[in-house]
Structure formats: C-alpha cells, structure tokens
Amino acid sequence: MTLAHRSLVTIDDFSNKEIEAVFSLASEMSDSMGEQFGICRGKVLASLFFEPSTRTRLSFETAMHRLGGSVISAADVKSTSMAKGESIADMARVVGSYADIIVIRHPWEGTAKVVADYAGVPVINAGDGGHQHPTQTLCDLYTIQKERQTIKGLNVALWGDLKYGRTIHSLIFALAKFGANILFCPTPGLEVPEHVIKKLITEYGGELEKREDSDQTVEGEFFPLDTIYLTPGSPHQLAMMPNISMQIELKAGVDALYVTRPQKERFAADEEGQELREKFPVVNKKLLRGKVFSKTLVMHPLPRIDELAYDLDADPRSMYFKQAARGVPVRMALIALLLGIKEISIPQEDSSSQTDYPLYNQGFGVRCPNPRCVSVQETEIHYLKPEFKIVNREPLTLRCIYCEHGCEPKYVASSDWHEGKLAEKKYHRADSHWAKKIKPENLLIFDSESEAEAHGFKPGTYAREPHQINDEKSDGQS
Ligand code: CP
C-alpha cells in the first residue's frame, strides 16, 4: 500500500498502519528539519481557507515552505469567484490544474469530498463544517503517542462541545480504531450527534454505557461523565453492570483530557445563549487536583476561549501548544507522502473500519436532511446527486456520503415492480414486510408520500399504517 496520490477527507481514509507511517516520517523529519528543505522543490500547494484559521493554515503553509515547495492561497471566500456563485466542483477542477496538492477548509460539510472527487490531485480536509478535521486528529494522536508511547487501552476524556466539534468527531473514530476507551463529558445539550454514535457502534464495535445517575462525581471527585465507550480490545467483564465498569475504568485515571470550546459559530438559533452551557466547568488547576487527573495529558485543538484556564499553561500536563507545534512535522510528512515524494511500504491491513454498504444513488426521492451539507447547497445541486450508503434496512437508514448525517426515510418502491415495467407504480411504508423484500439495487426511496406521488407513484397496500389497512378496502396488490 502507498499513500501516493491519495486524499485525506475523513480519518477513515487511512488505516492504522498508514497513520503510523505518517507518524514515523513526521518524527524523522522533526529530528532532521534542515535536511528536508528542497524535497518538494517545484511542487505547489494550494491553501484554500474559507473559514478562519491560524494553526491549520499556517502550519500547512510552513510545512510546504520547509519542504522547499511553493504555496498559493485563498483565505477568504469573498476574494474568490465562489463569491460570484462558482461551484465547488469548478473551483476544484481549476485549482487542481494549478497545484499539485490542495488543502481546503470550508463551512459546508462534505466539501472536501467534492474537491477530492473533482480536483484530480490529492486533497486534504482541513475542516469541513462540523463534520471532520482529520489532520488535527493526526496531531492529537501523534502527541498522545509521543507522550504515552501507545494509544491502545488509554482512557481519553472528551470535554465540552461534542456536538459541533469537528476535531471531536474525527478523534472519536481514531481513538476507537486504535483501541482507546472514550469518556464522554459533553456540555449539556452539546452531546455527540446520533449519527456519530451509530457509526462508532456499528463500525468500530465496542460498547457504549450511559451513566445513569445525575450525580456528577466519580470516586468522590467532580467529573461530569455522561457516557463511556469501551474499546473492543479491553476486558468488558463488567460491561453489563453500568456505572460499576465506569468506576473500574476510571480507577486507572484519565490518560488524556481533550477540551474543546463551544463552537458558537455553528449553534442553531435556539441554542444561542443557553445558560447551562455557560455554567459548564472551566478546566483549570483546581479541577485537575483530583487523583484521576494526576497524570492526565491536557489537550485542546485551540483556539481556546474561556473553557481552559491560563493557569494550566505552565503545568507539565498541558499539551496544547505541543499539539499545535507538532502540526508542522506531521503535515510535512503527510504532504511528502501524498505527493509520492516519500514512499513508505505499508502492509495491507485486514481490519479496515470501512464497511461496504450498498449505495442509494438514484438521485431523487430523498435529500440529505443536514442544511449544512454540501449536497443541498444552491450552487451545488445542479451537478451533485444526493447519494447515500444504506447502512440499515430495519429501520431503513441512510447515511449521506458527503456529510455522513443519517436519515430514516419512510417510503419505498421497487424499480423492479412488475418485471421492471412500472406499469403500476406503487409505494409502500419502509417498515412494511413488502419493503424489506426489495433488493438494494431496486430500491427507490422517498422522504414523504408527496415526494413519492410527485414521481408518479400511488399508495400501495402497505403505504398505510397497519390499523389503517384494516379499515380500507384492499387495492388488490400484494
Ligand atoms: N485547531 C485548529 O483547527 O485551529 P485553527 O482553527 O486555528 O486552524
């Protein structure tokens, strides 16, 4: 396996061995920074940041300069032709003809995937809305690995805005891939989104235990633990006894506490200024006096606002400035590997976290419900077909291939109806026994009855709830 000419859109795009290869090269480059100058001479990196950034943008640009390559950049959507309504795909094709590698940050979730699909050169996701930020995760894992020599079996607490924090979403999957336990400590109302939890459980295995009581102490110490994810690799003999296994896991202490700021720029209108959020505890020296935190790495992707006190900056447990500094060698290694300038032989792994789900790509009937998804934006709907993975049949559950949000459409039909003639186009409830018999390749899926009817389908026998069917005359269909 090689990383040459590949893109990094989500953390799932790389296997554990590939991530370790990036770390190994980053470490080597960090120890011989001066020797790396010139290895990317003649190569151009396009740095496209359509949202504010200090660390990610400047560390990518520093990384390319330190490798001796050149950088072209756009740091504001208003200064590009996207302000005139140009699509992401057109912009990607054009920039791909100028640059050898593209780094993009954009507020729409799934944008980096669209750029990777159209650019024709490697693309790195530097943050797409609240979806993922995989290179921040590389910096985070690299820091844990450097400080603790392993990730497997560690207890890592995620603290703060777990709903909109894209660094959190990438990190959750990465920690699960590498066999860490995850302790979820969300600000009330900012819990991990359901689609992230579902993917974690179905694709990474492990067990999720919700803390039953509202008493926010563990071992007598303040710790607002909501849920714990137990890695499949650790012994779960107590997993059937919620809270007890939590206590056992916590006796070992918290190995890393990953703090995040409230991502206010992504809050829905009704989430602004809710008081609970303001009362969520600040992580400071006093809070970390507890025994469970005695050897904790205090991490933060930065920027911080007021959730992480300055009194911790000189504390040896604080890692956040190291995380940011390590962004340069990590991104140097990534650029060199994706450009194929450095090759590392990486054994193929059989434990890929990517599951091969059937696709729903008919392009009609159902739209991604996420208003921040790239696939529903006005400039993009002319060429982007809605496309979903069918991740479950009971209940029918789709996952958008761009932003990974989930939806459970209520109505289906079959393209194979009456030997494909569609002479009698009928739709049925997605949870009816009739619907479950349709092969994935024949599924037509509808958000609503009106959507099915707009496409010329009529309600079939199983379009109604069972109690309604009893009250209606059969329409003669099976
Ligand atoms: N951690 C991070 O993404 O920081 P910036 O927003 O400054 O790039």
Image: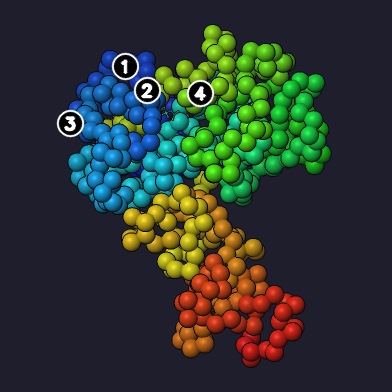
Q: Where is residue 93 in the image (x, y as percent from the top left)?
A: 24, 49
Q: How crowded is mark 4: few (under 14 residues within 10 Å), some or many (20 or more)?
A: some
Q: Where is residue 305 in the image (x, y as percent from the top left)?
A: 52, 23
Q: Is residue 306 above or below residue 107?
A: above
Q: In this view, does 81 lie to the left or right of 427?
A: left
Q: Earlier in the sequence, mark 1 or mark 4?
A: 1
Q: Is residue 408 left or right of residue 50?
A: right
Q: Name the residue under label 3.
A: 42
Query: Which mark lies nearer to you, 2 or 4?
Result: 4
**Circle number at residue 304:** 4
Is residue 94 visible to the viewer in this orientation of the structure? yes
Q: Are marks 2 and 1 in contact (CB under 8 Å)?
A: yes
Quadrant for the N terminus in the image? top left
Q: Position of residue 419 (x, y in %)?
A: 49, 85
Q: Which residue is drawn at 33% across and 60% down?
A: 383
Q: Residue at x 62, y 21 (%)?
A: 282
